[in-house]
Image: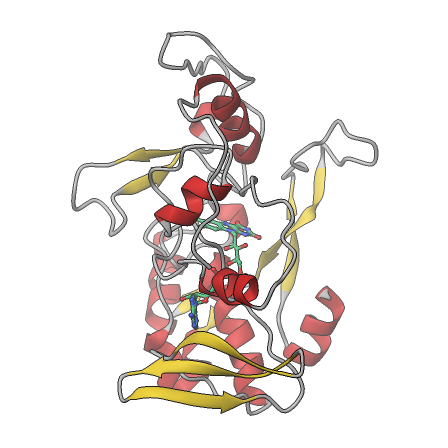
């Protein structure tokens, strides 16, 4: 996949130095790092009219590479002020934004027609095959025919309270992702009779709420700082519940197991 994106899509990755695997002690784990990939800075002016249409992360400066943030490196090497000014002037973005820019560029290069503000709502099923979708646009409902297949890629369902309560094993109060991920693809798949698996799990991350106005989500991810020596996290009863230095996914997994008030049998959501 990485080779295809690099060769055919022009996406430029690098191995983030020193960032260990999430479970480095598992067989084959790499405690010294080398598996996690970062995205090279991508020049957004390449995208032409799409340059200003890509969402900017609320959490970091968009002009940093993975190895220049606390999430990617224990001691991040910060770019000089001169380098920062250069990146800003040239709109050179890194991290997820840089990856999205490079992927978008790859799509535009091969002529993918991208429609924004167009929400897929229903699969059109013919003889057991998905042959298109009904989409909602500002001008009303439209039918889009598929020539070969329909791929559902609408992200997760973390912004859909009914689905969260029905499926997840933990009580999620503040998703850290884009609010348009309301499980539409899941709903369409369920209506089409799809078999579901692994629905209790999420890719968890501990967050803290910020006072209004610090970033657009009013959230901060608790990542590098909790893993430093002498940091201790406790639950609501004042008890330490995990190794603070494990991955963010494992920290929340542990906190849910020990502190979640939620229990009982999930009810089936409306499909
Ligand atoms: C704060 C944060 C940090 C992360 N950091 C990393 C990281 O460092 N490395 C890493 O590998 N991963 C990271 N991830 C995870 C990564 O972002 C996701 O795994 C990835 O974006 C999922 O891609 P996707 O295309 O499946 O869904 P998404 O990127 O969530 O995209 C789904 C899209 O579908 C759209 N959509 C929803 N409903 C409809 C509809 N009905 N019709 C049309 N469109 C619809 C949504 O608006 C959205 O744009 C992070 C995630 C978060 C939230």
**Residue 176 seen:** no
What x and y, as percent, mark residue 126?
62, 85
Residue 93 location in percent, x, y? 43, 64
In the rendering, at what x and y percent does residue 160 appear? Answer: 37, 52
Decide: is 157 above or below 231: below
Residue at image location 48% in from the left, 37% down from the top? 266
Name the residue: 38% across, 45% down. 175
In-front residue for pair 125/11: 125
**Residue located at (63% from left, 39% from top):** 19
Question: What colour scheme has been applied to the protein in the rendered image?
Answer: secondary structure
Q: Confirm whether residue 118 shows in the render.
A: yes
Above-or-below relation of 78 to 49: above
Residue 184 left/right relative to 12: left
Q: Nearer the viewer, residue 17 or 176?
A: 176
Total label count? 0
The residue sitting at 71% across, 65% down in the picture is 2
Quarter where residue 235 is shown: top left
Compare residues 133 and 38 and report the one nearer the observer: 133
Q: Reply above or below: 104 against 193.
A: below
- The image quadrant of residue 142 is bottom left
Quadrant location of the N terminus? bottom right
* Residue 232 position in % (x across, y down): 44, 14
* Residue at far right of view: 27
């Amino acid at each position: 996949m990485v080779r295809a994106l690099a060769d055919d899509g022009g996406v430029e990755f690098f191995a983030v130095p020193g960032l260990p695997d999430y479970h480095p002690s598992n067989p084959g784990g790499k405690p010294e790092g080398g598996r996690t990939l970062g995205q090279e800075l991508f020049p957004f002016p390449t995208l032409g009219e799409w340059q200003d249409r890509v969402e900017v992360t609320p959490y970091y400066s968009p002009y940093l590479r993975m190895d220049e943030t606390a999430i990617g490196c224990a001691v991040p090497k910060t770019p000089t002020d001169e380098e920062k000014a250069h990146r800003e002037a040239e709109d050179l973005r890194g991290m997820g934004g840089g990856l999205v820019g490079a992927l978008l560029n790859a799509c535009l290069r091969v002529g993918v027609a991208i429609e924004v503000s167009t929400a897929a709502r229903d699969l059109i099923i013919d003889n057991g095959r998905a042959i298109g979708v009904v989409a909602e646009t500002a001008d009303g409902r439209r039918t889009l025919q598929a020539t070969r297949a329909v791929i559902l890629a609408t992200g997760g369902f973390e912004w859909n309270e009914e689905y969260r309560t029905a499926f997840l094993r933990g009580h999620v109060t503040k998703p850290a992702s884009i609010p348009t991920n309301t499980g539409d693809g899941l709903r369409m798949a369920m209506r089409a009779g799809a078999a579901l698996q692994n629905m209790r799990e999420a890719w968890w991350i501990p967050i803290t709420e910020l006072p209004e106005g610090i970033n657009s989500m009013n959230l901060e991810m608790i990542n590098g700082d909790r893993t430093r020596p002498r940091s201790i996290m406790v639950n609501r009863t004042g008890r330490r519940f995990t190794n603070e230095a494990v991955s963010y996914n494992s920290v929340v997994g542990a906190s849910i197991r020990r502190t979640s008030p939620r229990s009982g049998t999930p009810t089936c959501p409306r499909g």
